[in-house]
Protein backbone atom coordinates (compact mmCIF):
# COMPACT_ATOMS: atom_id res chain seq x y z
CA UNK A 1 0.00 0.00 0.00
CA UNK A 2 1.38 3.42 -0.99
CA UNK A 3 0.50 5.93 1.70
CA UNK A 4 0.04 9.66 1.27
CA UNK A 5 1.54 12.08 3.78
CA UNK A 6 -1.95 12.73 5.12
CA UNK A 7 -2.62 9.04 5.60
CA UNK A 8 0.65 8.49 7.41
CA UNK A 9 -0.15 11.38 9.73
CA UNK A 10 -3.04 9.37 11.14
CA UNK A 11 -0.57 6.86 12.51
CA UNK A 12 2.05 9.27 13.83
CA UNK A 13 1.90 9.20 17.62
CA UNK A 14 -1.59 7.70 17.46
CA UNK A 15 -1.52 6.28 20.97
CA UNK A 16 -0.51 7.56 24.36
CA UNK A 17 3.07 6.37 24.61
CA UNK A 18 4.21 7.60 21.21
CA UNK A 19 5.59 10.89 22.46
CA UNK A 20 5.43 11.76 26.14
CA UNK A 21 4.42 8.68 28.14
CA UNK A 22 2.23 8.93 31.19
CA UNK A 23 4.34 8.66 34.32
CA UNK A 24 3.35 5.38 35.87
CA UNK A 25 5.00 3.28 38.55
CA UNK A 26 7.17 0.41 37.39
CA UNK A 27 5.22 -2.18 39.28
CA UNK A 28 4.09 -5.64 38.51
CA UNK A 29 0.75 -5.76 36.65
CA UNK A 30 -2.22 -4.51 38.56
CA UNK A 31 -4.26 -7.64 39.02
CA UNK A 32 -7.27 -6.53 40.94
CA UNK A 33 -8.64 -8.77 43.65
CA UNK A 34 -12.22 -9.92 43.32
CA UNK A 35 -14.17 -8.34 46.14
CA UNK A 36 -15.31 -10.98 48.66
CA UNK A 37 -18.99 -11.85 48.49
CA UNK A 38 -20.46 -11.55 52.00
CA UNK A 39 -23.46 -13.76 51.27
CA UNK A 40 -23.31 -16.25 48.43
CA UNK A 41 -26.47 -17.79 47.03
CA UNK A 42 -26.88 -20.39 44.28
CA UNK A 43 -28.04 -17.65 41.93
CA UNK A 44 -24.90 -15.60 42.35
CA UNK A 45 -21.91 -16.01 40.05
CA UNK A 46 -18.41 -14.90 40.98
CA UNK A 47 -16.60 -13.44 37.95
CA UNK A 48 -13.40 -15.30 37.19
CA UNK A 49 -10.41 -13.85 35.37
CA UNK A 50 -6.73 -14.58 34.89
CA UNK A 51 -4.98 -11.40 33.71
CA UNK A 52 -7.39 -8.61 34.66
CA UNK A 53 -11.07 -7.97 35.21
CA UNK A 54 -11.19 -6.96 31.54
CA UNK A 55 -10.49 -10.52 30.36
CA UNK A 56 -14.03 -11.10 29.00
CA UNK A 57 -13.98 -7.89 26.95
CA UNK A 58 -10.44 -8.54 25.74
CA UNK A 59 -11.39 -12.05 24.66
CA UNK A 60 -14.56 -10.87 22.90
CA UNK A 61 -12.88 -8.01 21.03
CA UNK A 62 -9.78 -10.07 20.28
CA UNK A 63 -11.86 -12.78 18.62
CA UNK A 64 -13.93 -10.27 16.66
CA UNK A 65 -10.95 -8.20 15.50
CA UNK A 66 -8.58 -11.13 14.86
CA UNK A 67 -6.14 -10.19 17.63
CA UNK A 68 -4.63 -12.20 20.47
CA UNK A 69 -6.44 -10.99 23.58
CA UNK A 70 -3.33 -11.63 25.66
CA UNK A 71 -1.33 -9.24 23.47
CA UNK A 72 -4.05 -6.63 23.84
CA UNK A 73 -3.95 -7.12 27.60
CA UNK A 74 -0.18 -6.63 27.55
CA UNK A 75 -0.68 -3.38 25.64
CA UNK A 76 -3.30 -2.25 28.16
CA UNK A 77 -0.92 -2.95 31.03
CA UNK A 78 1.87 -0.97 29.37
CA UNK A 79 -0.37 1.90 28.28
CA UNK A 80 -2.47 2.42 31.40
CA UNK A 81 -1.92 -0.30 34.01
CA UNK A 82 -5.58 -1.17 33.29
CA UNK A 83 -6.83 2.26 34.43
CA UNK A 84 -10.00 3.02 32.45
CA UNK A 85 -10.24 6.77 32.98
CA UNK A 86 -6.58 7.63 32.43
CA UNK A 87 -5.96 10.66 30.19
CA UNK A 88 -2.46 11.57 29.04
CA UNK A 89 -1.00 15.01 28.52
CA UNK A 90 -1.07 14.24 24.79
CA UNK A 91 -4.84 13.71 24.75
CA UNK A 92 -4.85 9.92 24.68
CA UNK A 93 -7.40 8.27 26.92
CA UNK A 94 -8.71 5.02 28.26
CA UNK A 95 -7.28 1.62 28.99
CA UNK A 96 -5.54 1.48 25.59
CA UNK A 97 -4.64 5.21 25.51
CA UNK A 98 -6.38 5.93 22.23
CA UNK A 99 -6.23 9.38 20.64
CA UNK A 100 -9.19 11.16 19.02
CA UNK A 101 -7.49 10.98 15.59
CA UNK A 102 -7.78 7.17 15.70
CA UNK A 103 -11.49 7.31 16.50
CA UNK A 104 -12.08 9.75 13.64
CA UNK A 105 -10.08 7.56 11.27
CA UNK A 106 -12.37 4.63 12.00
CA UNK A 107 -15.52 6.81 11.92
CA UNK A 108 -16.17 6.35 15.62
CA UNK A 109 -17.50 9.34 17.62
CA UNK A 110 -14.67 10.78 19.71
CA UNK A 111 -16.82 10.76 22.85
CA UNK A 112 -17.12 6.97 22.51
CA UNK A 113 -13.41 6.56 23.31
CA UNK A 114 -14.38 6.72 26.99
CA UNK A 115 -16.35 3.49 26.61
CA UNK A 116 -13.94 0.72 27.58
CA UNK A 117 -15.07 -1.81 24.99
CA UNK A 118 -14.89 0.81 22.24
CA UNK A 119 -11.44 1.87 23.46
CA UNK A 120 -10.20 -1.71 23.28
CA UNK A 121 -11.89 -2.30 19.92
CA UNK A 122 -10.21 0.76 18.38
CA UNK A 123 -6.85 -0.60 19.51
CA UNK A 124 -7.64 -3.94 17.88
CA UNK A 125 -8.71 -2.26 14.66
CA UNK A 126 -5.54 -0.18 14.62
CA UNK A 127 -3.32 -3.22 15.19
CA UNK A 128 -5.01 -5.03 12.31
CA UNK A 129 -4.63 -2.08 9.96
CA UNK A 130 -0.99 -1.56 10.89
CA UNK A 131 -0.25 -5.24 10.21
CA UNK A 132 -1.93 -4.95 6.79
CA UNK A 133 0.06 -1.83 5.94
CA UNK A 134 3.39 -3.34 7.02
CA UNK A 135 2.87 -6.48 4.90
CA UNK A 136 5.38 -8.51 6.87
CA UNK A 137 5.93 -11.93 5.23
CA UNK A 138 4.11 -14.84 6.85
CA UNK A 139 7.40 -16.70 7.36
CA UNK A 140 8.72 -13.95 9.64
CA UNK A 141 9.23 -15.14 13.25
CA UNK A 142 6.29 -14.12 15.44
CA UNK A 143 8.46 -12.16 17.87
CA UNK A 144 9.90 -10.03 15.05
CA UNK A 145 6.50 -9.49 13.47
CA UNK A 146 4.78 -8.50 16.71
CA UNK A 147 7.66 -6.24 17.76
CA UNK A 148 7.57 -4.32 14.47
CA UNK A 149 3.78 -3.92 14.74
CA UNK A 150 4.08 -2.71 18.33
CA UNK A 151 6.75 -0.21 17.35
CA UNK A 152 4.36 1.13 14.69
CA UNK A 153 1.56 1.31 17.26
CA UNK A 154 3.79 3.30 19.60
CA UNK A 155 6.00 5.48 17.38
CA UNK A 156 3.88 5.82 14.27
CA UNK A 157 4.10 3.63 11.20
CA UNK A 158 5.90 6.29 9.18
CA UNK A 159 9.06 6.01 11.26
CA UNK A 160 8.95 2.22 11.16
CA UNK A 161 8.52 2.20 7.38
CA UNK A 162 11.53 4.53 7.16
CA UNK A 163 13.58 2.18 9.33
CA UNK A 164 12.63 -0.79 7.16
CA UNK A 165 13.56 1.10 3.99
CA UNK A 166 16.92 2.04 5.50
CA UNK A 167 17.53 -1.55 6.53
CA UNK A 168 16.72 -2.82 3.05
CA UNK A 169 18.92 -0.16 1.42
CA UNK A 170 21.93 -1.18 3.51
CA UNK A 171 21.48 -4.92 3.06
CA UNK A 172 19.93 -5.57 6.46
CA UNK A 173 16.69 -7.46 7.08
CA UNK A 174 13.61 -5.19 7.08
CA UNK A 175 11.63 -7.98 8.77
CA UNK A 176 14.05 -8.39 11.68
CA UNK A 177 13.18 -6.38 14.79
CA UNK A 178 16.86 -6.26 15.68
CA UNK A 179 17.67 -4.53 12.38
CA UNK A 180 14.57 -2.33 12.34
CA UNK A 181 15.18 -1.14 15.91
CA UNK A 182 18.77 -0.24 15.00
CA UNK A 183 17.63 1.93 12.12
CA UNK A 184 14.96 3.55 14.28
CA UNK A 185 17.80 4.71 16.50
CA UNK A 186 19.83 5.87 13.50
CA UNK A 187 16.91 8.08 12.42
CA UNK A 188 18.13 10.63 14.97
CA UNK A 189 21.27 11.07 12.85
CA UNK A 190 21.05 13.57 9.95
CA UNK A 191 23.23 11.23 7.91
CA UNK A 192 20.16 8.97 7.86
CA UNK A 193 17.05 11.09 8.32
CA UNK A 194 18.09 13.46 5.54
CA UNK A 195 18.27 10.64 2.98
CA UNK A 196 15.69 10.72 0.19
CA UNK A 197 14.25 7.34 1.17
CA UNK A 198 13.30 8.69 4.60
CA UNK A 199 9.78 10.11 4.39
CA UNK A 200 8.91 10.89 8.03
CA UNK A 201 11.98 12.86 9.03
CA UNK A 202 13.97 12.83 12.24
CA UNK A 203 13.01 10.44 15.03
CA UNK A 204 14.24 11.01 18.57
CA UNK A 205 11.91 8.66 20.43
CA UNK A 206 13.70 5.38 19.77
CA UNK A 207 14.70 4.79 23.41
CA UNK A 208 11.10 5.08 24.56
CA UNK A 209 9.77 2.96 21.68
CA UNK A 210 12.32 0.18 22.17
CA UNK A 211 11.51 0.12 25.88
CA UNK A 212 7.80 -0.01 25.11
CA UNK A 213 8.17 -2.93 22.70
CA UNK A 214 10.34 -4.79 25.21
CA UNK A 215 7.84 -4.28 28.02
CA UNK A 216 4.81 -5.32 25.99
CA UNK A 217 6.53 -8.43 24.65
CA UNK A 218 7.69 -9.39 28.13
CA UNK A 219 4.15 -9.04 29.51
CA UNK A 220 2.71 -10.85 26.51
CA UNK A 221 4.99 -13.83 27.10
CA UNK A 222 4.05 -13.83 30.78
CA UNK A 223 0.36 -13.74 29.93
CA UNK A 224 0.72 -16.53 27.38
CA UNK A 225 2.21 -18.69 30.14
CA UNK A 226 -0.85 -18.26 32.40
CA UNK A 227 -3.75 -17.87 29.97
CA UNK A 228 -4.92 -19.64 26.85
Image: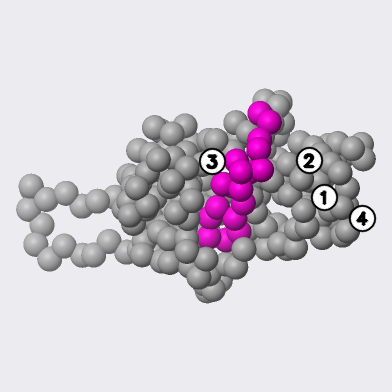
The residue at 43%/60% (across/down) is: 93
Residue 173: x and y, percent? 83, 37
- How far apart marks 4 and 2 lie (CA) works out to 16 Å
Secondary element under disc 4, as helix, strand or loop, is helix
The C terminus lies in quadrant:
top left
The residue at 78%/40% (across/down) is: 164
- Is residue 147 a member of the stretch shown in magenta? no
**Residue at image mark 4:** 191
The residue at 51%/41% (across/down) is: 126
- Neighbour class for label 4 at 10 Å: few (<14), some, many (≥20)? few
Secondary element under disc 3, as helix, strand or loop, is helix
Nearer-N-terminus badge (3/4): 3
- Dividing the picture into quarters, in which one does residue 144 lie? top right
Residue 31 sits above or below residue 108 on the image: below
**Residue at image mark 3:** 127
Front residue of this view, candidates 190 and 62? 190
Residue 197 placement, left or right of 58? right
Secondary element under disc 1, as helix, strand or loop, is helix
- How far apart marks 1 and 4 lie (CA) works out to 12 Å
Residue 96 seen in this snapshot: no
- Dividing the picture into quarters, in which one does residue 205 lie? bottom right
- Disc 1 + disc 2, Cβ < 8 Å: yes
- Neighbour class for label 1 at 10 Å: few (<14), some, many (≥20)? many
Front residue of this view, candidates 120 and 224? 120
**Residue at image mark 1:** 183
**Residue at image mark 2:** 164
Front residue of this view, candidates 213 and 119? 119
- Is residue 4 a member of the stretch shown in magenta? yes
Amino acid sequence: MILSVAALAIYESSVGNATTPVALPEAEPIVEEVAPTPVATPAETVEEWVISRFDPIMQKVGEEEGQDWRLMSAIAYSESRFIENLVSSQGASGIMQIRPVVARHFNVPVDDIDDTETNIRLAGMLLTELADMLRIPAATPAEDRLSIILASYNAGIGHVLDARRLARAEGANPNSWGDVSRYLQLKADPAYYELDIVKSGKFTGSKQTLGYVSQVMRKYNQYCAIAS
